[in-house]
Image: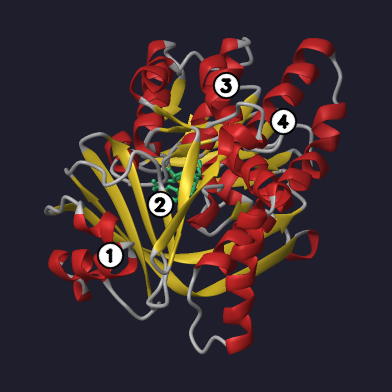
């Protein structure tokens, strides 16, 4: 067995783990990151693409923002289409000039991996069977196997950034953690296509046949979604069927100018809201999807991970560089306060824009009224805009 010692052991090589590893390394805080898959496997995942202002700033602070600033697109608004008509939410106008960056999570994760390699960071791929030990002691341990050999890492802190299905949250005794969950009776069927995006800004479409979203990764790579029943599988949907259904749910002028083409990726994701409390147990800290999940409607998933990492980064700096552990002690409370606001916004956007099976007529009229109120009230649009560009960390 090989033994290692480090200050912080990070489990999970997605955006959360990589970002924290990079930020800590830049401050001279030694850390080891364990990822169970290969770099190629992690980068094969297609995920979200809207970055809050705060996330973009964190990428720049991590010295990983150069390609994002070069290739990402600044978006100052988006559209909401409702059964044929379309109105714009002016993000910049309602937030004093704030905006979001549209830049694919896959590319962002690639940039983080490249930055870790450039700093010769300790990122261990194909680290299998990670297990957490002595979590409540002042010297917790993580063991894992690689190439048939067992390894042991002694550390001060463990960061569980291993996603919803990871080992970290499940290592907390059931009587020490509370889980809150809401499942939605629909999924999102998403495709990537090498086509010109139909709109320079995102279009969120409410339609009696179901929700649709027009997004993009670049001016030659489009990302589209349609709401589908949870019982659907990708095999149920040919490209042609997808394009036909998407056209039905968009305003005629938008559908009429849409460039279609073969899908280069096609997948269905369920809609789920989930929060685990607290986000600390002993010297284990949960971050990102390991602690919380949102439906993708409000584009909060990656951005919620960002605020966790921001809080952990500053708390670890204060601990190691100033001997002040108050940030660590307050982490769970601070992170959850912002997480629940993202949960609320994601639930609100999802409830507003989706067609729910067996939806009572009253609820349908309520949706219509909510949209009418939104577009008749500057205050309502300001509320939506400040949540979408990102509440302060
Ligand atoms: N050991 C090591 N690594 C693990 C383990 C384990 N036992 N279990 C999971 N992992 C790895 C996964 O392979 C994955 O690469 O942890 C990583 C977790 O990454 P994400 O699931 O992307 O979670 P996170 O980094 O918090 O990023 C959140 O990703 O899922 C999207 O919508 C979500 O945009 C949000 C973002
Ligand atoms: C995406 O581009 O994948 C995307 C954009 C906005 C969302 C969800 C997904 O709300």
Q: Which residue is drawn at 12% across and 52% down?
A: 261
Label 3 residue SS: helix
Residue 219: % across, % down: 25, 34
Residue indicated by mark 4 = 311
**Vertically, is 330 above or below 361?**
above
**Vertically, is 156 above or below 363?**
above
Q: Can residue 281 be seen in this view?
A: no
Residue indicated by mark 2 = 203
Badge 4: how crowded within 10 Å, few (<14), some, or many (20+)?
some
**Can you tell which of label 3 and label 2 is closer to the viewer?**
2
Q: Which of marks 1 and 2 is nearer the N terminus?
A: 2
Disc 3 to disc 2, C-alpha distance: 25 Å
Q: Which of marks 4 and 2 is nearer the N terminus?
A: 2
**Can you tell which of label 4 and label 2 is closer to the viewer?**
2
Badge 3: how crowded within 10 Å, few (<14), some, or many (20+)?
some
Cβ–Cβ under 8 Å for marks 1 and 4: no
Residue indicated by mark 1 = 246
Residue 330: % across, % down: 84, 36
Quadrant location of the C terminus?
top right
Q: Which residue is drawn at 65% across and 56% down?
A: 376
**Vertically, is 108 above or below 243?**
above
Q: In which quarter of the image is residue 182?
A: bottom right
Disc 1 to disc 2, C-alpha distance: 12 Å
Cβ–Cβ under 8 Å for marks 3 and 1: no
Label 2 residue SS: strand
Residue indicated by mark 3 = 57
């Amino acid at each position: 067995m090989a033994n290692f010692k480090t200050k912080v052991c990070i489990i999970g090589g997605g955006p959360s783990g990589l970002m924290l590893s990079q930020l800590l390394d830049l401050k001279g805080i030694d850390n080891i990151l364990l990822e169970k898959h290969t770099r190629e496997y992690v980068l094969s995942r297609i995920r979200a693409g809207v970055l809050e202002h705060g996330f973009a700033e964190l990428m720049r602070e991590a010295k990983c923002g150069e390609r994002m600033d070069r290739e990402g697109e600044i978006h100052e608004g988006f559209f909401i289409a409702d059964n044929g008509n379309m109105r714009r939410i002016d993000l910049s106008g309602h937030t004093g000039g704030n905006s979001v960056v549209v830049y694919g999570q896959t590319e962002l994760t690639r940039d983080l991996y490249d930055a870790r390699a450039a700093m010769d960071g300790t990122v261990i791929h194909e680290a299998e069977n990670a297990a957490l030990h002595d979590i409540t002691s002042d010297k917790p341990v993580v063991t894992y196997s690689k190439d048939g050999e067992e390894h042991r890492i002694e550390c001060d802190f463990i960061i569980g950034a291993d996603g919803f299905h990871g080992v970290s949250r499940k290592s907390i005794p059931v009587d020490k953690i509370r889980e809150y969950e809401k499942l939605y009776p629909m999924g999102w069927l998403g495709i990537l296509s090498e086509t010109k995006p139909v709109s320079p800004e995102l279009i969120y479409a409410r339609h009696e046949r179901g929700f649709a979203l027009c997004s993009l990764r670049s001016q030659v790579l489009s990302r589209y979604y349609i709401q589908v029943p949870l019982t659907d599988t990708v095999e149920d949907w040919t490209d042609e069927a997808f394009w036909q259904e998407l056209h039905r749910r968009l305003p005629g002028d938008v559908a009429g100018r849409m460039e279609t083409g073969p899908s280069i990726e096609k997948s269905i994701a369920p809609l789920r809201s989930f929060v685990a409390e607290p986000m600390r147990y002993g010297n284990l800290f949960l971050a990102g999807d390991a602690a919380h999940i949102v439906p993708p409607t409000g584009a909060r998933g990656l951005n919620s991970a960002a605020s966790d990492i921001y809080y952990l980064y500053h708390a670890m700096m204060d601990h190691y560089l100033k001997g002040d552990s108050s940030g660590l002690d307050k982490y769970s409370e601070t992170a959850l306060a912002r997480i629940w606001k993202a949960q609320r916004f994601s639930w609100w956007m999802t409830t507003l824009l989706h067609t729910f099976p067996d939806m009572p007529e009253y609820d349908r009229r309520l949706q219509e009224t909510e949209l009418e109120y939104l577009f008749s009230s500057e205050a309502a649009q300001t509320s939506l805009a400040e949540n979408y560009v990102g509440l302060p960390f």
